[in-house]
Amino acid sequence: MTLPLVTPAPEADAERRRSLRRMRSVALGLLVLAAVVYVLTRDSTGFLGYVNAGAEASMVGAIADWFAVTALFRHPLGLPVPHTALIPRRKDDLGRGLEEFVGENFLQPGIITERVQSAEPTRRFGAWLAHPAHSARVVAEGSVLARTALSKIEDRHVVELVEQVLVPRFREEPIAPVLGTFVVEAVRDDLHHGLVDLAVSELHDWLVVNHETFTDILAERAPWWAPPKLNDAVTSRLHSEAVRWLVDIRDDPQHRARAALDSLLARLGDDLLHDETTAQRAENLKLRLLEHPQMVATGVSLWKGLRNVLRDALADPEGALATRVRDELVRLGTQMRDDTAMQQRFDRVLSDATVFVVERYGQEVTSVITQTIERWDGKEAAERIELHVGRDLQFIRINGTVVGGLVGVLIHAASHFL
């Protein structure tokens, strides 16, 4: 099945057609001029003999080159002369040749690497990005795209993701090895100490500020027969001791409670990795959480909150998020512009990635040329190609007329001399 050729710019094609007609008229005019001169100087001698020989040779050259140019696109004068109308008849071969030419001369790893590195894309992009106006434009365009993407994600999509992708995946994946490894590594690298410090400090501050709340909670659980004054004294003492205990833990990195917590976490991580009972309990807890009806609703609620926060932050061009991103982009662009080592590293990564893509998909890319040309109509393809290159090919006819005349004069002079 043949495909019609698309005309992306009719106005440009109209101008090309007019230019082609003008050049054809010039070439034809030279041929007619040579014919007139030949007729007027026929059987002449002396200087006019040279003119006649030149005119005769000009006609021969003009007609020969007209035949050669025309034979590329159609049969000259409609005559089925062998080896004419080359493009309509052999467009498929030309397409395959063009595919091989592009693949062999443009999609070679060495050529691609050299072109990418000589273009200095990292430095040039960094110089562009370092300009505050350009970074602001990137943030503005990115914010619009991000807000559009967020608006396209509906709640049902999140529900489907949680129910059909995340929950089945989490259900199949054993949690004990992952959780146990995390706990063991966290204890080994003391990653939990910062969290413990934060929790102790916040709990201490809460107890100090909420003395009455703490004592009221304890008083509600006191025996009914206990005297109120005794309850008040006991709850106040418990509050004071709790605050003092938290201060000791907060200020003493080697406190026994901290050591006990470290030991507990280390034992928990080891049990999760090596004790089947503990691992099974963790697995059962995971399954109960995943099967809880509130699981999906919680996931959707978290997503809604995150989406609202992101949309509000992205909608404010002068907000903290936009300002921070702009500043970071300017800083990154400046570093990319000035740091030679970074430029070489990024350019090398980009060239390697481009070479990988070309080596893996280059054949598919170049095959588009052959596949497309094979589906073109031969006659229409020839007309379109002639429209683009035919004007320049008319210079072959003009040159053939001029050069043929000069050669004719030289041959006549040599014959006369001999």
Image: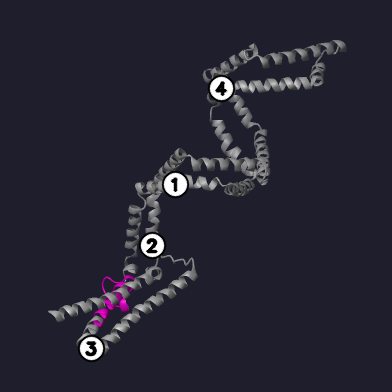
Q: Which residue is drawn at the image coordinates 40% and 74% (left, top)?
A: 20
Work out whether mark 2 precedes mark 1 in sequence or the reverse, and give the earlier one.
1
**In the rendered view, does 331 fall on the left or right side of 384?**
right
Q: Residues within 10 Å of mark 4 (few under 14, many from 20)?
A: some
Q: Nearer the viewer, mark 2 or mark 3?
A: 3
Determine which residue is flagged by label 4: 186
Three-letter residue code for mark 4: Ala
Look at the image and tell me in which quarter the N terminus lies. bottom left
Determine which residue is flagged by label 3: 42
Work out whether mark 2 precedes mark 3 in sequence or the reverse, and give the earlier one.
3
- Position of residue 343 relative to residue 79, above or below, is above
Cα–Cα gap, marks 2 and 3: 50 Å
- Position of residue 14 relative to residue 180, above or below, is below
Q: What element carries label 3?
A: loop
Q: Which of marks 3 and 4 is in front?
A: 3
Three-letter residue code for mark 3: Arg
Q: Are marks 3 and 1 in contact (CB under 8 Å)?
A: no
Look at the image and tell me in which quarter the C terminus lies. bottom left
Three-letter residue code for mark 2: Ile
Three-letter residue code for mark 1: Glu
**In the rendered view, does 270 fall on the left or right side of 245?**
left
Q: How crowded is mark 2: few (under 14 residues within 10 Å), some or many (20 or more)?
A: many
Work out whether mark 3 precedes mark 4 in sequence or the reverse, and give the earlier one.
3
Work out whether mark 2 precedes mark 4 in sequence or the reverse, and give the earlier one.
4
Cα–Cα gap, marks 2 and 1: 35 Å
Q: Which percent across, then down, holds residue 288?
A: 63, 28
Determine which residue is flagged by label 2: 373
Region of the chain picked out in magenta, as a range:
55-84
Q: Residue furthest left?
A: 418
